Image: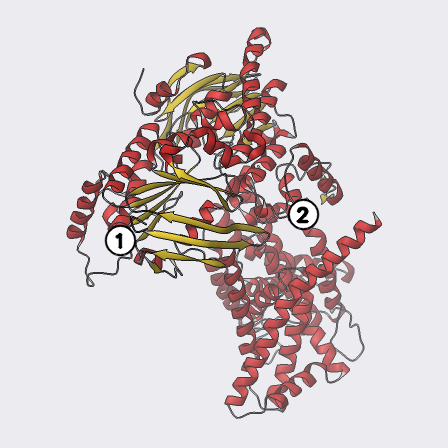
Amino acid sequence: MATELTVRMVGITKKFPGVLANDHIDLDLHPSEVHGLLGENGAGKTTLMNILFGLYRPDDGQIIVDGQEAFLRSPADAIARGIGMVHQHFRLVRPFTVTENIILGLKEGGALLDLRTAGARVAAVSEKYGLKVDPYARVQELSVGEQQRVEILNSLVRGAKVLILDEPTAVLTPQEADELAGALREMAKQGKTIVFISHKLDEVFKVTDRLTVVRSGKVVFESLTSETDKKQVAREMIGSDIARLKIGETSTIMAVAGAASLSEAREKPAAAADQPARAVDVLRVHDLHVRDDRGLPAVRGLGFSVHTGEIVGIAGVDGNGQREMVEAITGLRLIESGQVQIKDEDATRWTSTDYIEHNVAYITDDRQNEGLILGFNLARNAILKRFAHPPFSRHGLLDMPAIDRFAETLIGTFNIKAFGVHASVGTLSGGNQQKLILARELSTKPPLIIANKPTHGLDIGAAASIYQILADERGRGAAILLISADLDELLALSNRILVMYEGRIMGELPKGQADPEQIGMLMAGTPL
Amino acid sequence: MALETTHDNKTNLKRAWDQLFPALISIVIAVIIGGLLLVANGRDPLAAYLSLWQGAFGSFGRFTETLVKTTPFLILAISVSLSFRCQLWNIGAEGQLMVGAILSTWVALTFVSLPVYLLLPLTFVGGFLGGAIWSGIAGALKAYLNANEVITTSMLNYIAFYLTAYLVNGPMKDPQGFNFPQSPLIESALQLPILVHGTRLNAGFLVALLLVPAAIIFWRSSAGFRTEVVGASRRVAKYAGLNVVSTIVFVSILTGGLAGIAGWGEIFGIQDRLIQNIATGWGSLAIVIALLGELHPLGMVVAAFLFASMVVGGDAMQRNAGVPFALVDVIQGIVILLILARSYFFARRAA
């Protein structure tokens, strides 16, 4: 062996009740490399990395760090051995400054804090790797991209040689993602090892030196990035069945996931355009102003409309008022000024109950904390919005058999994989949880569907079936508002794309004219 | 169809056992630790427990005394389980019981001229209302101002205690009571019928037992479902179009009302008058019972009976074997520690 490996994971096996998450996985990490770790959701890549970071203990297998066997019982052990991890959800204290966050838990210095020296140290590390951030800024004032840099700095200051990034670009603008890629390359050049977990092939091929594909808990493919191509990797990720579909060059998700459904989806808007007379506005938003949780303006003069049989895509980086807008037009957040109209009714003062009574479907982007109760079973989640009405409730008492039958219908129609209607929803995969939400929301044939990041965190197979469902709903004549950070998804499904930036519509692109670069510019606040 | 039913029964039985087993283990461990403490103090644990057992079950009379104590324990446990399943940490059952007792006694002493068949139900309503108002105060503070219910309900306990003390020493004091801090006796016609002649076992016990199926039905009603959704997640509840504020107020009123009924049962079934220390320590006992019973109505029947036997037997043990009643407190404390340890352990494993 020419260069000594930084980390070797040998025969790692981890069982969870009912699932073999890691099945004798071998993984070698070299110094000075960016190592892509790919796989569908539930393939076992996050479990593997949680083992390397000491969050889980493997049932079997060895971890060798710098030639010595390491027993990682906690993240503290991992950090001590030079392994750092940046999670999808940041673990920062928002009212604290960058420096305060970084020195939190560092076991050095005396009883008194020396913030000035610490700040200088943070600045030096941030300089060294091109991770620009003000050491004295408060975290709550930072953008998502900057917060991510703070997390990375946090690991580096603790002496990380190996840095695990779990889907780091999911929350970033295209420009921010490019900056991150630059910083990662710089870190690798200076000898660090980066593990880059991702769904997005484009960026994996842009950033990584080497890649490993995990499927169903096993390593199915490994290669130098330069010696393989996207088609091959995509095929390995999803296995043999879907791989036979034709694969386009430009867009990963489009290409792999739903070649069939998406090409079909692309045809349908044309058909709708043939009969423009039929289209009626279902949702109209006029000069909408909404404040965020901190009382600051989040939506500032937003206006648009959605008519029957179309999907209007809202593009934008997270935190540009999408969440507040969605909550305002589903009755969950107070509207400061402006108007919302659903069909012919003024909905400006509607509560969430009113929206449900008017049959507006809302697919939340937070399925685990808002859309579902993970501790409840499927049947109980299926009736969450309508349990008080017949046939689920008669004379105030729940009709359990009717509820079970309804849930069984949903499972059948939407092909939800679960151990029956009494299985706890927490045991379902993310894709099946999302299908359950869709099944519940669409079971009433809603005229208006508000879908906030409906495929967020899903693997491409699950995403494809969600696309198919939304396209079918449009075919039925539903008006759909689709909010997403995933350009491929928006380009594939939307009839029109509106780009949201700082609470306003930055620009509107009819489908034919939208290309990712233009949208990326608008998302970053640059007018065309 | 027949097959399905068998299958369901099996899973129900297994589920019941899964819930019962940890509770049993908790009790056994607590009893063993209590015994070790006795050994450490140079006492004979077997003799102490035997005397406790005889105190609770040694004769038919003792057994009925255990059932008499089961009555308020069960009602209070059902009361707190209701708010716990809505994630409202109501620890004010004791205060709610006292206000229920005050109001029902006041109704009985004020409207003496009414016929019994009107007055007795009215005292029941008074008991419910008293508890409901007391708990409703905390509920409204929680719902509208997000005031922590642990703090408000425990403060209301003190207010209720001193209110009772004030009333039985002042406005409601029995003028012919030889200066004892107690109210006049209620009309004997208002006393709840005795179930077994020569014992104190009264119709209040039946009320407690009736509340068990009522609670089971409640959890199968849409109101119960709403309560559980709000308890599981305020956010999901709002998303599902539920009115979180009104649900919290509703649950508070119901939970307090039930505690008030326990107070009514104590006055009209046992004491026949308002006294100062009507329910000392019962609020925390009710919490232990509810948690030990996994907040399930049937589980709480078993747990309430168990703790009633320990309290009744503990009194006898203190008298006959000279072992302090504090042993029962120790067992109670260990049980709650074990329950907490278990839920903490499982929460960590799940995370």
In which quadrant of the rendered image does the C terminus of chain A lie? Answer: top left
Q: In the current view of this chain or complex, which residue is farthest to the right?
A: B2
Crowding around mark 2 (Cα neighbors within 10 Å: few <14, some 14 to 19, many 20+) is: some
Element marked by disc 1: loop
Number of marks drawn: 2
Crowding around mark 1 (Cα neighbors within 10 Å: few <14, some 14 to 19, many 20+) is: some
Q: Which residue is mark 2?
A: A422
Q: x, y percentage for residue A38? A: 44, 39
Q: x, y percentage for residue A510? A: 44, 13
> In this rendering, would B87 be left or right of A377?
left
The chain to which mark 2 is attached is A
- Asked whether the viewer can see residue A18, the reply is yes
Mark 2 or 1: in front is: 1
Q: x, y percentage for residue A441? A: 60, 32
Q: On residue B83, which mark appears? A: none
> In this rendering, would B203 be left or right of A518?
right
Q: x, y percentage for residue B30? A: 57, 76
Question: Which comes sooner in the sequence, label 2 or label 1?
Answer: 1
Front-lying residue, A262 or A137? A262
Which of the 4 image quadrants contains residue B51? bottom right
Q: Which residue is mark 1?
A: A158
- Disc 2/disc 1 C-alpha distance (Å): 46 Å
- Asked whether the viewer can see residue B105, the reply is no
Amino acid carrying mark 1 in the image: Arg
Callout 2 touching callout 1 (CB < 8 Å):
no
Element marked by disc 2: loop
Is residue B84 placed above or below B189 in the rendered structure? above
The chain to which mark 1 is attached is A
Q: In the current view of this chain or complex, which residue is farthest to the bottom?
A: B42
> In this rendering, would A512 be left or right of B277?
left
